[in-house]
Image: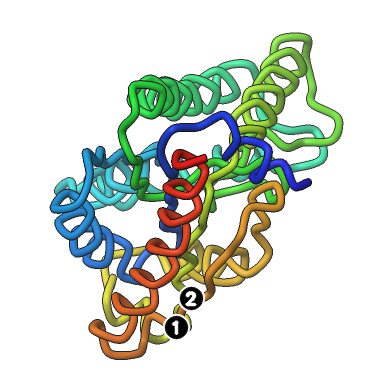
Amino acid sequence: MSQTASFQNKRSAPLIAIVGADGSGKTTVGQELLDWLQTMRPTAFCHLGKQTGNWGRAIARLPFVGKKLDKQVIARSSKARDEKGAGAAVSAIIFILSMRRVFRFMRMQRLHRKGFTILTDRYPQAVVPGPMDGPGLVARSPKGMIARFLTRQEQALYNWMASYPPDIVIRLNVDLGTALKRKPDHRPASLERKVRDVPRLTFNGAPILDLDSTEPLDQVIRKAKEAILATIARYDQATAK
């Protein structure tokens, strides 16, 4: 029995995750599905990202100093992925941002345990490090006791979140060209990495529905609804027993 199947025996409502790179249509698809689900059953929407990209784009738009500060942020963040990793200060900032996701995840769990069907934008995973909802502190040999401690703690937190898999993952795939057209204010290098990483995500064995987000929206929504209805039916059957 898969881990997701074993969780279904204990859960009272489905947990549905929408994942994809920026520009894949998560917000649009998510809103359509949320409106539809709320006509059928109590449903809560939970954003499980850190949303640090919004901060970075806001910094980049600051007059005179924005671009310089943005480059410094990128340079310091990249150190966290080097062999030796970032120093204590940068590691602490990255860890605090990860805790923002942890708190959101805990809120989602509370709602789920109350019986709400959950629809999420993004979902944490522990296997692929980096901007696609994975750990940020991934240096193999972090320098300094504080950086090593925070790296271990962050990985443990992501392992814990990943151990609570969705019942169905709706994975919206998009090519880099389309993503850049939809999100022209995003950094191309960062967006390229996200597009590349999305197909690698496994979410601890959760069922994944792969959709091409360049298809007409009504087709994407129809396929997503079919998968969600099948998931709901499994819960209804379990409740009827």
> CB under 8 Å between callouts 1 and 2?
yes
SS state under label 2: strand
Which amino acid, by three-letter code, is at mark 1? Asp
Residue plotted at (77% across, 18% down): 148
What is the quadrant of residue 34 in the picture? bottom left
Q: Position of residue 198 (x, y in %)?
A: 57, 65
Q: Nearer the viewer, residue 193 or 87?
A: 193
Q: Earlier in the sequence, mark 1 or mark 2?
A: 2
Residue plotted at (26% across, 42% down): 45
What is the quadrant of residue 126 in the picture? top right
Q: Position of residue 86 (x, y in %)?
A: 66, 29
Q: Nearer the viewer, residue 101 or 33?
A: 33
Residue plotted at (73% across, 33% down): 85
Residue that mark 2 sits on: 173
Measure the alpha-carbon separation of dots 1 and 2. 5 Å
The crowding category of the residue bearing disc 2, from other C-alpha atoms within 10 Å (few below 14, some 14 to 19, many at least 20), is many
The crowding category of the residue bearing disc 1, from other C-alpha atoms within 10 Å (few below 14, some 14 to 19, many at least 20), is some
Residue that mark 1 sits on: 212
Residue plotted at (26% across, 47% down): 66
User: Which color scheme did the rendering employ for the protein?
Assistant: rainbow
Against 15, is 229 above or below? below
On the rendered structure, is 167 left or right of 225?
Answer: right
Q: Position of residue 220 (x, y in %)?
A: 34, 80
Which amino acid, by three-letter code, is at mark 2? Asn
Q: Residue furthest top?
A: 145
